[in-house]
Image: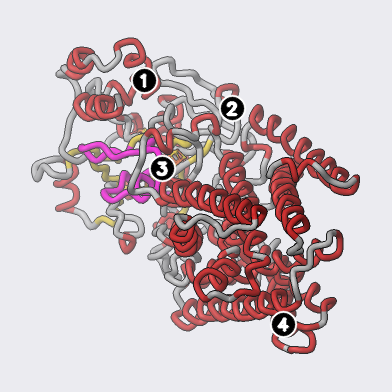
Amino acid sequence: MKSSRRGFLKITGATAVGLGSMQVAGSFASSGTDDSVATKTSKNSAALTAKHWAMVIDTRKFHSAEDLEPMIEACDKAHNIPKHDDKNHEIKWLWKDEFKHVFPTIDDTYLNDRIKHLPFLVLCNHCEEPACCRACPTQATFKRDDGIVLMDFHRCIGCRFCMAACPYGSRSFNFKDPRPAIKHMNPEFPTRMMGVVEKCNFCAERLAVGKMPACVEASKGAILFGDLKDSESNVRKALKENYTIRRKLQLGASPAVYYIV
Amino acid sequence: MLELSIKGSKKYYGLLTILAGIAGIGVLFFLYQLKEGLGITGMTRDVSWGFYIANFTYLVGVAAGGVMVVLPYYLHDYKAFGKITILGEFLAIGAIVMCLTFVLVDLGQPMRILNVWIYPSPNSVLFYDTIVLFGYLVLNLVIGWNVLQAERNGTHYQKWLKPVIILSIPWAISIHTVTAFLFCGLPGRGFWLTAVLAPRFLASAFAAGPSLLILLCLLLKKFTKFDPGKEQIQTLSKIVCYAIIINVFFFLCEVFVAFYSNIPEHMDHITYLFMGLHGHGVLVPWMWASAIFMLTGIILLVVPALRRNETTLIIACVVIIVGTWIDKGLGMISGGFVPNPLHHVSEYVPTFPEIVITLGIYAIGALAITVLFKMAVSVKEEVGSA
Ligand code: SF4
Ligand code: SF4
Ligand code: SF4
């Protein structure tokens, strides 16, 4: 069951995870280890695939916090992110912060004025060497072959080891029931239960049906998303032509999110 | 032998009732937490581990500390400890029971705990930690039970037990090493990211565990016919003395490396704990208290006359237990999370329900230790070795 499910996730690339591991688990509960189910769903020709998904954020195209709102809102809406009143219990997949917080190790006293006051988008980096996956005692968080780091909300025991391990503060824990705090319910995406961890999933559910990530779509070209291993891809072109930085490179996690500054 | 634990005086039953009562209240609050979620604790998105994991870490140390009586007796044939090894083993059992309970109540989805073994993850230190902790529990149950049974029957314990006992010695070291590895292998947490964390955990464990054992021995002496012996207590107190000095030494090594190298990621956490950071410093008085407690403990134990005096020895043990608890419990966990990876300072303070649940777990542990100690003492009284 375990290996077939894991294989399933890999093949599909995945409506599976997109629609939530909830349904994956569900479909297997009824079908056992019947592989035909997997193959049927996997033949989604519309799915966007890559050897290694990566994101390039062109921060020159943003000037104020308002400029970032549409993207954050798009993500929140697409993924049923609850809005809790208590800041301590916040669930954040995509949010904004200042340079000195996003890049604390390269923050500088006499920083360029624009960058100093510019809000930066923050999200899971989908690290090539993800400390979160290393730490997880149940493989509830795992890295797919295409580089996307995903969560299985139904396997997570809520130990929060991954939160301690993530050096980027990308993970949130459901300290309370998220459902009453969801403003716009998106029936296409599962809601989570109390007591599990979640984070940005690089919109795996949208890629699986041929759509770009919600934030990318809402960014009007300011965020690029593509295959890092394809030298002709949009992200590789952007990386070739622009100077980019990544967060806390010295930790060896190798983030897949690049920032043009 | 279990029957020995149910034949007791009124006082004994009174104690059991009180402990069971506290445990019961803890359970009620835990049910409340199950319903409402971990939001009822002081833990936050930034400080995602709190009191439960702190006490868990501390008690792994207490459990490992039991080895400080087992090792001299079985490995060095230090006969005097023969009288109290069983207490060290039973203390370890109680401590591990508490540890495992703390891990359980800390989970967001405790019903899924078995996923750790259903989907074994050799990458995860937590996976190994559950294995070594369970293993240590089983080892101590087997050893403690059989050795005590043999003592009661007036025979030597079974031959096959000896290798098991020897195994339990490195195993004790392993439980605290693996527990330290939970923290010190994480890339973004400068406070924990140090090779001296496991040795430091062990040093503080070998101070705290035997300190507690001394106090428990003295309690037994006062309330039962059991006399742990002067020499035993004195040897234990020397062990505590060395261990607490080594613990403080390791900490000072940390401070040197962090501040001489001047690397912010390493300095910030220590600064936060002892001086406060960006105007936040709930732990500052606690940390200084811890430092003063540990230093007081050292002075009281280094001076032979004070160590030999029962009153000052008791004070020394108490301040060392409290000092290391603050250091490892409050400081070690919160200190690692503050400031957070984005360099924001958000502080952690445990809530009332969280503290009640914690006390409940301590009561469960105390209950286990009381019953086990009762059994041990009754056997000793029976065979006249008390
Ligand atoms: S940013 Fe954090 S959560 Fe995301 S993959 Fe890296 S370690 Fe994991
Ligand atoms: S909280 Fe969930 S995803 Fe994170 S380490 Fe624990 S089981 Fe894995
Ligand atoms: S990639 Fe998708 S999940 Fe991640 S931040 Fe963008 S919209 Fe949210």
Quadrant in the rendering for residue A24: top left
Q: Amino acid at mark 2?
A: Asp
Instruction: Check whether the beta carbons of the residues at disc 3 and disc 4 lie within 8 A of each other.
Output: no
Say yes or no: labels 4 and 2 on the same chain.
Answer: no
Along the line of sight, the residue nearer the viewer: A140 or B91: B91
Q: CA distance from mark 4 to mark 2?
A: 51 Å
Q: Mark 2, mark 1: which one is toward the viewer? A: 1
Residue under pointer 4? B301
Q: Residue, x 59% and y 36% (percent of image)?
A: A175
Q: Amino acid at mark 4?
A: Leu
User: Within 8 Å of ligand 2, the CB of disc 3?
Assistant: yes
Residue under pointer 2? A177
Q: Mark 3, mark 1: which one is toward the viewer? A: 3
Does residue A123 belong to the magenta stretch? Answer: yes
Quarter of the C terminus of chain A within the rendering: bottom left
Q: Mark 1, mark 4: which one is toward the viewer? A: 4
Tell me which segment is drawn in magenta. Answer: A120-149
- In the rendered image of this protein, does residue A226 appear above or below residue A134? above
| Main SS of residues in magenta | loop
Q: Residue A138: horizontal and vertical position, in percent?
A: 39, 38
Instruction: Check whether the beta carbons of the residues at disc 1 and disc 4 lie within 8 A of each other.
Output: no
Does residue A74 belong to the magenta stretch? Answer: no
- Output the chain of dot 1: A
Residue A25: mark in rendering: 1
- In the rendered image of this protein, does residue B159 appear above or below residue B251? above
Q: Residue B354: horizontal and vertical position, in percent?
A: 70, 44
Quarter of the N terminus of chain A within the rendering: top left
Q: Mark 3, mark 2: which one is toward the viewer? A: 3
> Quick one: label 2 or label 1, which is nearer the N terminus?
1
Q: Residue A113: horizontal and vertical position, in percent?
A: 42, 62
